[in-house]
Amino acid sequence: MKLSLKALCINVVLAFLASLFIAPALGASVPLVATTIVATSTVTQYIAPELFKGIAMEGLQTEVWIAGIKENPVPNNSFIYQSVDLSQYVEHNKLHLAEAGVEPAVHEDYFATANNPLPVTDITDIGNEVVLHTYSTEQTRHRELQDIELSYDKRSSIIGRHRLSLENNLGKRAAYAWAPQKNDDWNKVCLLSASDSVIDAIIDIKSFLEGKDIYNGINICLNADHFARIRKEDKRLYKDIMNENQMYGIKVFQYNQTPLYTKMGEKKPFGATKDTEDKQSSFVWVTDEVFRCFGDVKMYATLRDSGLQADTISFAQRALVGVIRAKKPKYLGAIL
């Protein structure tokens, strides 16, 4: 087996810490005990692993594997980060939300003409407890995961493939959750013909939001077709978007796994197949109106499976994406 300098350094540190407790009990010096531990583990793992097969390590170091997924569940440049992080409110993989009630009215010079107390408005928040979903990757088969664990590059490669699958899953679910169900008083859906302007539709949605006093934190995910149409409509604007990732004060992201809508402008169920007359959307959302949260990450590994004659590994991530106003979503938009 190839000697890993990083693994050797880790062994040295662990051996030193262990010797702080072992050496006094043996009446030996700390350096001597630490050197003995390192030498023994080095022989075990690198020089003669066949002599200690099944003895040196009975399992994998779970923390080493799940850290690669838990510390960075989605890329830093992902559109998912344009949301409120509610992870701190997750307890036992349950999210406790409180949707705000009605806002109290404001009176001008009330007591100039009245002697009665100010009116009382009930603003009781609407409680909402949601259990985080569990997203599990399929098992992947490998040879000698214990050996792979000691190689940073090989371990990162495996973790990266599972993390990418989880990222893609969460992206599709966020896109679906943050797109409006249909056009209504609080959400705008623009149905375009082949000759209609995508730029005009974006301006219309921004105007709609500004009419609701929403000026900041507006984002859009453009699918490939709509982005290409913008390029044809205004090449200078297209270049500005590419350079600055924004247009008209709206943060712009390119994403193609967006929800499908019927020809009447109604969002289809998640995972639905595209029919002939269905339309793929670009969608608009406001950062403060949507959320993301992450819970536990677990790893499941089987070493030396007799049927497969190999090791298997999979991951389970607890996560949830959605809208803050779960009962009545607001300030969402879609272009079809």
Image: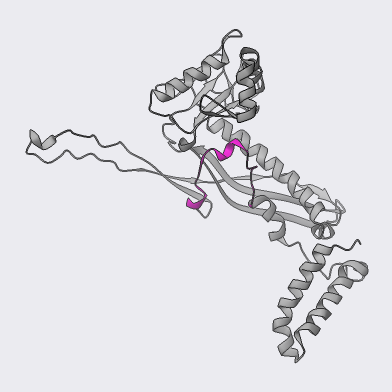
Residue 247 on image: x %, y %: 55, 25
Residue 186 on image: x %, y %: 41, 25
- Vertical relation: 75 (above or below) 23: above
- Residue lying at 50% horizontally and 24% vertically, measured from the top left: 333
Q: Is residue 254 visible?
A: no
Give the camera-side residue of 248 and 55: 248
From the viewer's perspective, is 318 left or right of 181? Answer: right
From the viewer's perspective, is 183 left or right of 229? Answer: left
By what rule are the colours in the image chosen?
A: one colour
- Vertical relation: 308 (above or below) 324: below
Q: Quadrant of residue 275?
A: top right
Q: Which residues are magenta?
A: 71-89
Q: Is residue 88 magenta?
A: yes
Residue 193 on image: x %, y %: 58, 9
Question: Where's the C terminus, which quadrant?
Answer: top right
From the viewer's perspective, is 157 left or right of 175? Answer: right
Q: Quadrant of residue 32?
A: bottom right
Question: Where's the N terminus, which quadrant?
Answer: bottom right
Q: Quadrant of residue 175?
A: top right
- Residue lying at 75% horizontally and 44% vertically, measured from the top left: 161
